[in-house]
Amino acid sequence: MKTSKYRAVPLAAGLALAVVTAAVPAAAQSHHAPAAQRVTLTNVDDGRTVALAAGDDVSVMLTGYRSQGLNYTWSIPQSSTPDVLRRTTGGTTPTGSASGVLHAEKLGVATITATRHCRPDPGRICPGAVLLWKVTAEVK
């Protein structure tokens, strides 16, 4: 009986020590290295400025639309400074929507832009205006 008591105490103490030791690095790591974040931008974010940290991603989702025989379509979002904010994916849809993901590489400022164009149905005429969508990204 005495033997099992002595075995149980060191085992329990050892397990408690292992749990405490394993928890310390995870807590310390989350304190010093915050997880990368993803910022999502849409049509309504035109003119906005966003603050990012290196390693963050920006997801841009612009929605095209159709009205009275006119199709309003977006170009794929671009970065003015790819060494600061690099596009990793991008594409368009048949409905005129466009999307892209941009990754914050290093400190600096970049402008994300896309343009909206009109494509008319046969027999229709588009207005001559092209809309510029623009967001300033500050990587700090």
Image: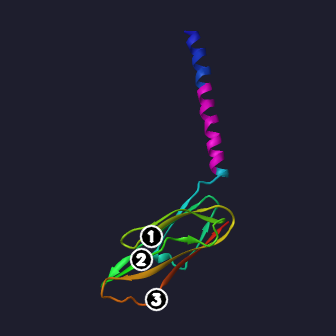
* In the image, residue 17 above or below residue 41: above
Write down the region rendered in magenta. 13-30
Say what secondary structure mark 2 lies in. strand
x 64%, y 40%: residue: 24
For the point 61% across and 36% down, the residue is 22
Coordinates of residue 97 in the picture (x, y in percent): 41, 71
Query: Alpha-carbon neighbours of circle 3 within 10 Å: few (<14), some, or many (≥20)?
Result: few
Locate the N terminus by quadrant: top right
Label 1: few (<14), some (14–19) or many (≥20) C-alpha neighbours in 10 Å:
many
Residue 80: image tag: none
Label 1, secondary structure: give it. Answer: strand
Which amino acid type corresponds to the residue marked 3 in the rendered image?
Ala
Residue on which disc 2 sits: 73
Identify residue for label 1: 98
Q: Position of residue 82 (x, y in %)?
A: 63, 67
Q: Quadrant of the C terminus?
A: bottom right
Which is nearer the N-term, disc 3 or disc 1? 1
Cα–Cα gap, marks 3 and 1: 19 Å
From the image, tell me which residue sits under label 3: 129
Disc nearer the start of the sequence (3/2)? 2
